[in-house]
Image: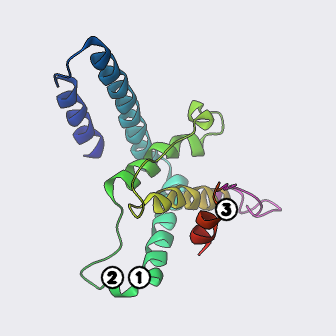
Amino acid sequence: RLPAAYGEWIARKATLEVGSDKRVETRDELLHKASDARRRIAEGIDLLATDPQVRRAFCLANEAMAEAALRRSPDRYDESRRPRWYLFQLAFVLLNLRGIHDGEHPDRGRVELIFFPTGGGKTEAYLGVIGFCLLLRRLRRAKMPDGGLGVTVLLRYTLRLLTLDQLG
């Protein structure tokens, strides 16, 4: 339902009156990018439905993220309230699946930016993508001599304090 609901939202915004021709141009450019993101989310969902190894890596990454949330904030959850993704986090993970899965996919050359207020869940979103990368590599290379071990992801933080905070 996510791609369909996002598509409906995009269609509603396309009819929004914004004023000047320059604003119309900006609106249309942003909605084109949103449509591209919607397509990529749908492709990620399709990949999960058709590739058992990708689905397994995705499920394991979700389990790892939930376990980390439970350990980090045990008082926040109980049997009726379990860790779950915010919608933007899930969308971010889904729209990156195809490019991670296929080394030749055009999305491999993309850089994604999550712009969201502090404390909103950006870290979990990119850690979900990282978890998927690590687990997919391990699953794909399980019978290889390296067993899927080695450098899979590089992180770079520009601020030392942020680095220390994220490391924690």
Would residue 157 appear left or right of 128 to someone viewing this image?
right
Residue at x-position 25% and y-position 34%:
7
Which amino acid type is shown beneath numbered disc 1?
Answer: Ser
Residue that carries the numbered disc 3 in the rendered image: 138
In percent of width and height, residue 132 lies at 55, 58
Mark before the other along the chain sequence, 3 or 2: 2
Eye-nearest disc, 3 or 2: 2
Pointer 3: residues within 10 angstroms few (<14), some, or many (20+)? some
Q: CA distance from mark 1 to mark 2?
A: 5 Å
Q: Which residues are magenta?
A: 139-156
Q: CA distance from mark 3 to mark 2?
A: 31 Å
Assess whether mark 2 and mark 1 are in contact (beta carbons under 8 angstroms): yes
**In-front residue for pair 21/140:** 21
In percent of width and height, residue 36 lies at 40, 30
Which amino acid type is shown beneath numbered disc 2?
Answer: Arg
Does the magenta portion include 72?
A: no
Residue at x-position 61% and y-position 66%:
161
Eye-nearest disc, 3 or 1: 1
**In-front residue for pair 99/31:** 31
